[in-house]
Amino acid sequence: MKFIISGRNFEVSDVLKERLIKKIGKLAKFFNPDTEVHTTFSMEKNNHVVEVTIPFNGVVFRAEEKNDDMFTSIDKIVDVLERQVRKNKTKVEKKIKSAPTKDSIVSELEDSDTDDKRLKIVESKKYSVKPMTLEEALMQLNLEDDNFLVFSNAATKQVNVLYRLEGGGVGLVEPE
């Protein structure tokens, strides 16, 4: 694994780098040797923040931990990433055993409940839009902590958005 470590308004010590490489190195068995691990250390008020992003085979494993101790944040982030990797592995195995059809996914999306609540924009983020099938996008949404996923639909070549509904379903936004 290739580690890209940076600090945002924070000087990353060699001890922190070694601890991160040792802890995340335990996950190396799940990834190719040339997989990049992007890590950012920062301070927010009195919290130490560690953000780790691992793009791998079209899936992005991402975790962020805030704690009053940087070493504790590193330990917790490894647990989160390991859970995501295992969840993805299980889903891939299930997908191979019983591949869902597009009709079953569309009917699931149509059956989901919708809420008509108005939201205010309180935060803005930039995302890279990657081409994926609808099934891959659903899998990626389940791996992430975010409530939505912006992706390029591989079938239609258009930007789509998957989002979680409060009732437990998933919504799909497609351009006409």
Image: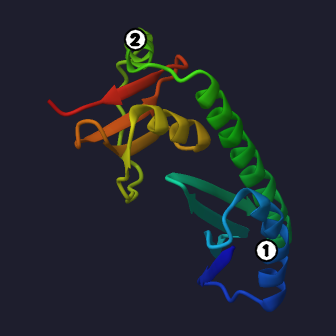
Which residue does the numbered mark 2 point to in the structure image?
Answer: 107
Res 68 seen here: no
Quadrant, the C terminus: top left
Rendering coords of residue 171 (x, y %): 39, 25
Amino acid residing under circle 1: Leu
Above or below residue 17? Residue 32 is: above
Which residue lies at the image location 40% right of the left edge and 33% below the top edge? 134
Quadrant, the N terminus: bottom right
Which residue does the numbered mark 1 point to in the structure image?
Answer: 20
- Binning the other alpha carbons within 10 Å of mark 2 as few (below 14), some (14 to 19) or many (20 upward) gives few
Amino acid residing under circle 2: Ser
Rendering coords of residue 71 (x, y %): 85, 71
User: Closer to the camera, 104 or 54?
Assistant: 104
Label 2's element? helix
Side of 32 where 79 appears, left or right: right
Q: Which label is found at residue 5?
A: none
Name the quadrant containing residue 89: top right
User: Of label 1 and label 2, which has the lower sequence position?
Assistant: 1
Q: How is the image coloured?
A: rainbow
Nearer the viewer's eye, disc 1 or disc 2?
A: 2
Marks 1 and 2, how far apart in space? 43 Å
Which residue lies at the image location 69% right of the left edge and 68% below the top edge? 50
Side of 92 where 121 appears, left or right: left
